[in-house]
Amino acid sequence: MLFGSIEFAVFLPVVFAIYWLLRRRLQWQNLFLVLASYVFYGWWNWRFLLLIAFTSACSYASGLLMQRSERRKTALWGNVAVNLLILGVFKYYDFFASELATLLGLPAEGWLLHLVLPVGISFYTFQALSYSIDVYKGKVAATRNVVAFFAYVSFFPQLVAGPIERASSLLPQFERGRTFHRRMAADGMRQMLWGLFKKMVVADSCAVYVDQVFGAPQNYGGATLAMAAVLFSIQIYGDFSGYSDIAIGCAKLFGIRLRRNFNVPYFARDVAEFWRRWHISLTTWFRDYVYIPMGGSREGRWHTVRNTFVIFLLSGLWHGANWTFVCWGLYHVLLFLPLIVSGRNRRFCDDASLRDMPRMLLTFVLATLGWVIFRSPSLPFAMQYVVGMAHAGQWLQPELVVLPSIGLMMVVEWLNRRCSHPFRRLPRCRWVRWMVYIFLIFIIVAFMQTDEMPFIYFQF
Amino acid sequence: MIEILLFAAVSAVGVALLVCSLGGTGWLRNVQYSLGLGDHTLTRSREAEVWGPVDVLFVGSSHSYRTFDPRVFERHGLRVFNLGSSNQTPVQSEVLLHRYLEKLSPRLVVVEVHPDIIGYDGVESSLYWLSNSAPSWHNVPMVVRSANAKVLCTAIFSTKKNLGRSFRRYVEPEVIEGNRYVSGGYVEREVECWHPTPQPTDTVHFLSSQLHALRRMVSTIEEAGAECLLLEVPDTRMLDGALVGLDEFRERMRMFGDFHCPRPPQLDDSLHFFDPGHLNQNGAEIYDEYIIDLIYEHIGTDVGHLARRSGSGAVCYR
């Protein structure tokens, strides 16, 4: 079920109404939320429900075992192993098996499982893992409330593409009663509206051009390839941050606060700042559960470099089983390391101003080159694409709506870059606010792509 | 709650006003107003309003309006009309039946079904009908069932546009790009040389919304007291051979009613088609002559409107 679909437009109000009707019975409310989340997730393929239920059950049991028994470490590593095994089999097995077979000069076909990748498996697996690790470290107490825990793992707004939540912030919200706040719900709806605009107008419009050019880059000249690379940067931002806005806004309708996942990353002035602003929930996950346990930056420069290298490599691999993702991670680590070595990785922690435009543009260009690797089906393809940018050839005009919609998104986000989302602060006058909403609804209805376009991050 | 309802009403009106005011600029991607396009849908819709009772009504896609030539049926004393449009699916056909069934009061409705069409969303056809027919409440279900922003925006804009004088005054040329309109909803294609080429393999897809619409359509026809016949018009053998799931399609169609897929033995891919899926004029005439007995089987031995009018079994209407 996609956020922009008719099914979701029916699903959400129904779930919202029943959910708040059950507000006096917390356990029933949570149970209903789990049920609704499973319906939402099972819409893709009901068989995936078995997997998410198994992941939830394992993590819940490991939490209780850690709390009650002496074998805390065994319970933790047991759960980590089970979760990573599931993730590995579904997401990485075929890739590594075929690479190994190629290396040994054997036919790969007999080794492959051809399993369908369950939607959002990386997201909920990481969320479940964070619970186990936090319980082990004593940051959070193991919950006995099985319904609340299942709701924590499967909460439908953020189930398939994040933000990846922590047990310490999300689980307590399911364990205590929630009250309906009109302002919070209205703010959530505003954020959802902005997210829908970013996804359905900006990202999907870019996608048409990007798919055409990346589908046959040899047919186009350098200017077109460069334009497609830029538009892919915008597409992936609009798509993923749009999803996050819808998810966070949707959660607010249910009285749940989710963490911010994007903080205007294309206004970053260097790559270090970019990574503090892009997919925040994943980068902080790797920071907290991989980088810091490995020693972080406390054990000298060499260890810092090694640890940074590892988390970027893992971050690349997290996105998918392909060398392009690994190289994308390596590309970013190469941009990042000079900043770490020179101790300038925390140079930009304040708000950017227009004077920083050249730095922002440079960072955007560097990020865009990285996205070319990310978007390419293979490394030779990426190389040819980058080389092709230097050659003349046919120009493909983007659709009329593309550039104005990107301009609108960027200007609005720039003007509201200090807010948690651009519609956070609007004029108090109701009619002015309504005019803004109506204009945005009109833009969405009049310019949205009518072909179904799933979110890019669903595949991860 | 009242505020939400008020906002919903205000925003619906606001969006509609913006679409109406800016729809004509050509900037809005989802306003696809196409007056005069779509293989004479405008002339067909105008004719359907005044055509009067018929013996046989054909509904379906381009296979319908490019196959069932009213002149052939006239020779057999039958008055017919084609309510088809490009890529028209059961969702649109159902709406058109509700709009025109009473006016045309057919004795037999032939629903043209095609393995390609049953998997389409029918947006193209909706856009043609909305742009080329007078505004009507009957269009509302078409918009709702399409659940598509393009159909919605075009419906809003064409409602405003087609209430105006420019729509009423617009006259469609009789021949557009080699396609000649023939009274009765038919479109005749000039016979030209065409060489069939191997077709890529394709699989028949079934959209449940189309199957539901087909079922409702059959019920509507029966409730109106007319006979219903489901007919699959032939494609080239090359196209048939490239379709996976054709047998399943035919099996499923039989579950909806009296389904037939007659194919005259003399039909030849290169002589009687102008593309992989459409008969040319020679092919259409051969096919129509071939199915005439089947049609008479369904409307009984009783003679048709034209024959009754002249008192003979076969007359020329004009």
Image (cartoon, coloured by chain):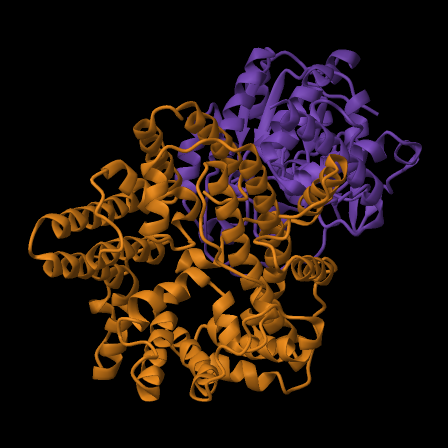
Q: Horizontally, is B2 left or right of A184 in the view?
A: right
Residue at 38 percent of width and 48 percent of height: A159
Question: In the figure, residue A161 lies in which quadrant?
Answer: bottom left
Percent across and percent down for residue A103 are 24, 83
**If the image is split into quadrants, where does the C terminus of chain A sit?**
bottom left
Chain painted in purple in the figure? B
Answer whether residue B84 is visible to the viewer in this image.
yes
Work out whether residue B178 or residue A152 is closer to the camera in this orientation and state it: A152
Residue at 71 percent of width and 76 percent of height: A355
Image vertical order of residue A325 relative to residue B124, above or below:
below
Image vertical order of residue B21 relative to residue B200, above or below:
above
Answer whether residue B290 is visible to the viewer in this image.
no
Percent across and percent down for residue B39 are 75, 42
Residue at 21 percent of width and 79 percent of height: A106
Percent across and percent down for residue A448 are 64, 49
- Which residue in the rendered view is the most extreme toward the left? A70
Image vertical order of residue A306 relative to residue B292, above or below:
below
